[in-house]
Image: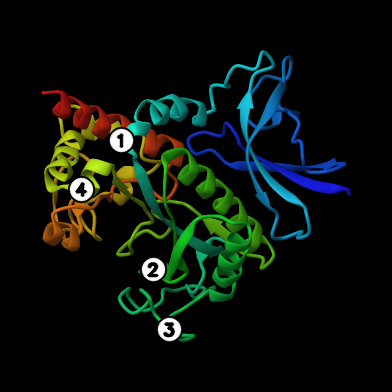
Amino acid sequence: MTIKAEYIWIDGTQPTAKLRSKTKILADGSTLPRWGFDGSSTNQAEGHSSDLVLEPVFSCPDPIRGGDHLLVLCEVLNTDLTPHSSNTRALLRPVAERFAAQEPIFGIEQEYTFLKGERPLGFPEGGFPAPQGGYYCGVGAGEIFGREIVEKHLDLCLAAGLGLSGINAEVMPGQWEFQVGALPPLEVADHMWVARWLLHRTAEEFGVSASLDAKPARGDWNGAGAHTNFSTRAMREGYDAIITACEALGADGKPLEHVREYGTGIEERLTGAHETAPWDQYSYGPSDRGASVRIPWQVEVEKKGYIEDRRPNANVDPYVVTRLIVDTCCTELERREQV
């Protein structure tokens, strides 16, 4: 049986990478071979030496084409089969393996904004909609824009077997969120990248763009983030580990180290307003959506659970944010256990 395999990869565009894909026809889906592409057209190579390699690392059913067709997420390798410099997944893999015994898991809340041309969906031509407030988790044609795209995207992700756990309308018109997880680091990031690809592909059919811009509308409007929920086995069992993780993220040098890698435009979004902490200050606390890291209220009550890093932008690389959090928090949790 002939299979259409859509090979998906992350390119080298700066400052924010883009998704690319192309279709390979296979006799069957039992073996997914390596493939090549022109890196000079994806900001990953020079024209005089442009061949790069696609290494399949995750596949799932293609819910758009249906049947036995596949979506195939790939790492980018050099022709000597070493990881390409743009391959952030290869940097996460050894960190995830090193701390696997601590059983780290993540849930990532992906906010995004639909754009019609240059304007967010729901913004009238030549003006602005009513101030934000009624749009969050709203209902009705005056509050909600793009629901048909959102529902189709959700159905496609579930049909693909991706680990989505929910959706909701966000604070600004045309702004939405889907959640992936809870899953281990590599899995949550793989699922997120494929879910992003499906989001762009679904919006394409409606003549709409899905933007991960951190501040898609200037002025008194919320930005778009990727709040990252994290726990280890110790955190799920006790509160001391929760505090240890929060303090590890605030240790000398760590806040700026993380924020620099948390997505393009972080200073425009993390202003101290619109449910954010200032980008250059670190804080944590229970139920505090104005803190860098929030301890959810039920975690404070039950004295176990998880934390939410509210700093990552919508355009953050999930391989990067999971690597940084695991490395920082699990290193300190391991050290405390050994004392």
Going by the numbered disc 2, the residue's amino acid type is Glu
Q: Which residue is mark 1?
A: 102
Q: Is residue 99 left or right of residue 113?
A: left
Circle 4 or circle 3, nearest the eye: 4
Q: Secondary structure at mark 2?
A: loop
N-term mark: 4 or 2: 2
Give how far across and how far down residue 155 sits, in percent. Answer: 60, 67
Q: Is residue 292 above or below residue 216?
A: above
Sequence-first disc among 4 and 3: 3
From the image, tell me which residue sits under label 3: 139
- Figure quadrant of the C terminus: top left
Tell me what residue is drawn at x 45 percent, y 46 percent: 315
> Which-is-in-front pick, marks 1 and 2?
1
Label 2 Cα neighbours within 10 Å, binned few <14 / some 14-19 / many ≥20: many
Q: Earlier in the sequence, mark 2 or mark 3?
A: 3
Q: Which residue is mark 2?
A: 170
Q: Is residue 97 above or below residue 288?
A: above
* Marks 4 & 2, CB-CB < 8 Å contact: no
Disc number placed over residue 237 in the picture, else none:
4
Residue 59 lies in quadrant: top right
Q: Amino acid at mark 1?
A: Gln
x and y, in percent, of residue 111 in the image: 42, 58
